[in-house]
Amino acid sequence: MSTGPHDGRGPGAFERDGDQRLRTLVGCIGDAVIATDAAGNVTLLNPVAASLCGVTEPEAVGRPLRDIFRIVNERTRLPVDSPVEEVLATGQTTELANHTVLLGPDGRETPIDDSAAPIIDGGRLSGIVLVFRDVTEKRRAAEANERLAAIVESSDDIIASKDLDGVITSWNRGAERILGYTAEEVIGQHISIIMPP
């Protein structure tokens, strides 16, 4: 059965069906999604966004985005400009700077990455769509890698790595001091330059 303006269900039936399909689609997305009108007031948010922002959709719809999407710089604790405000001002897609934290109403802090894009309807900006995700695990992994790299680099022991073909891929200061080769001299070279076959 086709749906449309002439399906006998009256004016607006197609728009209501389309709106419900859009809500269903947005609800299935694994990232948080919030849509606003041209004034920056929330018109839709999916369950992931509701959970991260600590609000329900009925509580959020109609409110200014800044009331439910409060973000600060993780290091300075200063408020971060909303990407939605930037899109409203420029009409261009934008992304948040690194180290942005979403503040929940319960005090929970969630590190996020996000982007905002204009919704263009009939050639004019009619709203903004904001897509963001919790990057807590990604940040933890990056911090763990940074700590490991610092340990390796500061070790007095030789710590080097090579790929399966025997090509040196890393070389720490301990290796430089003990073996006398700088990282620049050996990285990319075959391990045989320091270890005979």
Image (cartoon, rainbow, N blue to C red):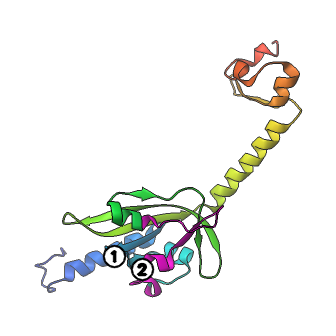
- Residue 110 position within the rendered picture, expressed as x and y whole percent measured from the top left: 62, 68
Residue found 49% across the figure and 64% down from its top: 132
Crowding near pointer 1: few (<14 within 10 Å), some, many (20+)? some
Residue matched to label 1: 39
Q: In the image, is residue 106 above or below residue 179?
A: below
Please name the residue shown 18% across and 66% down the image.
122
Confirm whether the magenta stretch covers residue 39: no
Name the image quarter holding residue 52: bottom right
Label 2, secondary structure: give it: loop
Residue 193 in picture, x, y percent from top left: 77, 13
> What span is colored magenta in the figure?
58-84
| Percent x, y of residue 125 | 27, 67
Residue 131 position by quadrant: bottom left
N-term mark: 2 or 1: 1
Residue in the image at 64% along x and 71% along y: 109
**Foreground pick, 5 / 123:** 123
- Residue 64 bears which disc, if any? 2
- 12 left or right of 87? left
The image quadrant where one finds the C terminus is top right
Residue furthest to the left in view is 6
**Is residue 185 shown to the viewer in this render?**
yes
